[in-house]
Image (cartoon, rainbow, N blue to C red):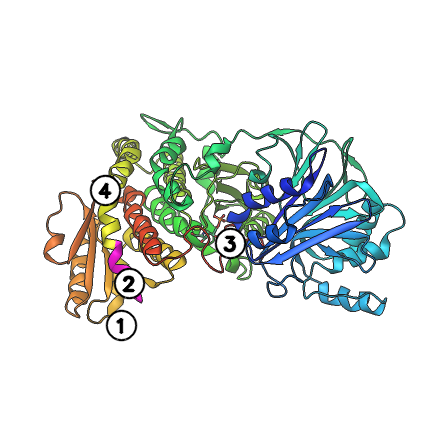
Amino acid sequence: MCGIVGYIGKQAVIPVLVEGLKKLEYRGYDSAGVAVLEEKGIEVYKSAGRLANLVEKLGDGYSDATIGIGHTRWATHGRPSDLNAHPHSDCSGDFAIVHNGIIENYLELKEWLIKQGHQIVSETDTEVLPHLVEHFYKGDTAEAIRQVLIKVHGSFAMVALSRNHKEQMVVARKDSPLVIGLGEGEYFVASDIPAILNYTRQIYILADGEIAVIDRDGVRVTDFQGNPIQKEVFEVKWDTVAAEKDGYEHFMLKEIFEQPRALKDTLTGRLNHNGVILPEVALTAEEVANINKIFIVACGTAWHAGLVGKTLIERWARIPVEVDIASEFRYRSPLIDEHTLVVVISQSGETADTLAALREARRLSARVIAVTNVVSSSVAREANDVIYTCAGPEIAVASTKAYTTQLEGMVLLALYLAEARDSLSLEKISEIISALKEIPAQAQEILNQSSAIKDLARSFIVVDDVFFIGRSLDWSVSMEGSLKLKEISYIHAEAYAAGELKHGTLALITDNTPVIALATQMEVYEKTVSNIKEVKARDAKVIGLTFKGNDDLAKSVDQVIYIPQTIAELSPILSVIPLQLLAYYASVARGCDVDKPRNLAKSVTVE
Ligand code: AGP
């Protein structure tokens, strides 16, 4: 996803911008650029491809400019190219703008600008912004931007430089994240906090509908009408080292291995002998009793966590749950009222579709609980209640520790609802709590055997198709295992409810087709084994996954991955770990770009 950085201060700006852009590389991008304010005017440097191309273009003789903006672009309107890269300028070269988001009515605006005599040179939606600023500019850039924002529809985080104001950056935000870092006589702008963490921990989080004028003396924030806004300083507590690779070859591997810690942190302070402690969810027992339906809404991996959440809530709290893909939710007129609880799950808290679903749910008067990993993210700020997962920053595009901690979030929420509705016996609650406390150490136990999975992954170098099968919660985890494999190793992978295979997909199983069969749900174990036999009879190569101590599965499969014993409802947190490792090692063995898979972005902030 696109990334923004900006700087005004005493340092030479280009190294600050380049370093900030490097910190944003994990978001995914296809081109990059910077604009700096020189005495003679604005100099723009842009390049398609990796940041290294831009750095090469910038050369060694950096300008000594001390104010500038930078951008990494992930193409939406117009292909990745030097010309389409940001920053974009107006006809006179008086303004340069970087932008995240989408200007939905850009075609109409472009047509209008062309009629006014403007020359639009790129295919992007963004380029209309500097031309509109040029059109409305009467000596005050912020005022011109206010005029522009009345005209544009869509989402944006934008930063503008003006040749006429060499000591000033103007930033604005609507539906796309933007923060301002406060240093000693220097100021930073970024779409994501890691970009500026090396310089400052004091930030302003710009809210929707705010514009800030930043000069060497400070930051002045107003709303889009120009009314002053007093901002509170937010102190970032993240450890910078937590965002580094820490000796691992890839962020993804580091994040897989961080799971015991992340799982422990997410439970810390939230369990006692009798149940869960979730003061952050402020529902009264009466409100819980009145909930007649729950929707869980999310995208990708977070949606997979929601599928597990559905089973847990229905099983333990006995409330009907529907799980929706966020991009579909608001277009299908969901039946929501004030007795509906909507749970949105999002690692980043910035996924556009999830945020839009949240807003729609609130508009329809539902109570919204967010499960998210990013403090003060948009989703966190807009939900009624927030359960934070404590995974720490997740940098790799492929989500791992965010998923397992989201599963814990689902367990905590399901237990909270069950306790409030008195739908579980004390013995059952205490059995779940005891099992939950074992999970971080059990995750470590699985990681200690990662070399066996690494060996197994070698056989994936040449395969084209892989099938994941399982029943009940094993099916939900199969979907996540399949997504992990396809997104980073580019192997075609599909997940099926094991009993569904014979209704069509079995036709695809031939000699040595790898099938990964999850068999941890003992209630349906015999049935899963029957399905495994069906694929075995078609000469599939079956890798089974079950609990340690179950020696039966080995009789029906070619190889078995064992995980520590736990209760059925918690097994997804453990069973997914070997699948994450398998995807990781397969990706490495196939020479893929593990942390930045092609065509994908970490955080999808456009619809
Ligand atoms: C999975 O590995 C992906 N990173 C993707 O499916 C991700 O889970 C999805 O885009 C949702 O992101 P979010 O949790 O930040 O909302």
Q: Disc 2 or disc 4, which is closer to the eye?
A: 4
Identify the residue under disc 4.
449
Q: Residue at x 63, y 46 (%)?
A: 60
Q: Nearer the viewer, residue 527 or 318?
A: 527
Q: Between marks 2 and 4, how big is the CA–CA gap?
A: 23 Å
Kind of residue indicated by mark 4: Gln
Measured as percent of width and height from the top left, residue 176 is found at 63, 48
SS label for mark 1: helix
Q: CA distance from mark 3 to mark 1?
A: 31 Å
Would residue 395 be counted in the magenta stretch? Answer: no
Furthest residue to the front? 61
| Residue named by callout 1 | 508
* Residue at the outermost right position: 138
Q: Earlier in the sequence, mark 2 or mark 4?
A: 4
**Secondary-structure class at tag 4:** loop
Residue 2, horizontal then vertical, whole percent: 59, 52
The crowd level at tag 2 (other Cα within 10 Å; few <14, some 14-19, many 20+) is many
Across and down, in percent, residue 563 comes to 22, 43
Q: Which residue is mark 2?
A: 467
The answer to whether residue 567 of the structure is visible from this angle is: yes
- For residue 522, say whether it is visible: no
Location of residue 541 (image quadrant): bottom left
Q: Earlier in the sequence, mark 1 or mark 4?
A: 4
Q: From the viewer's perspective, is 85 left or right of 116? A: left
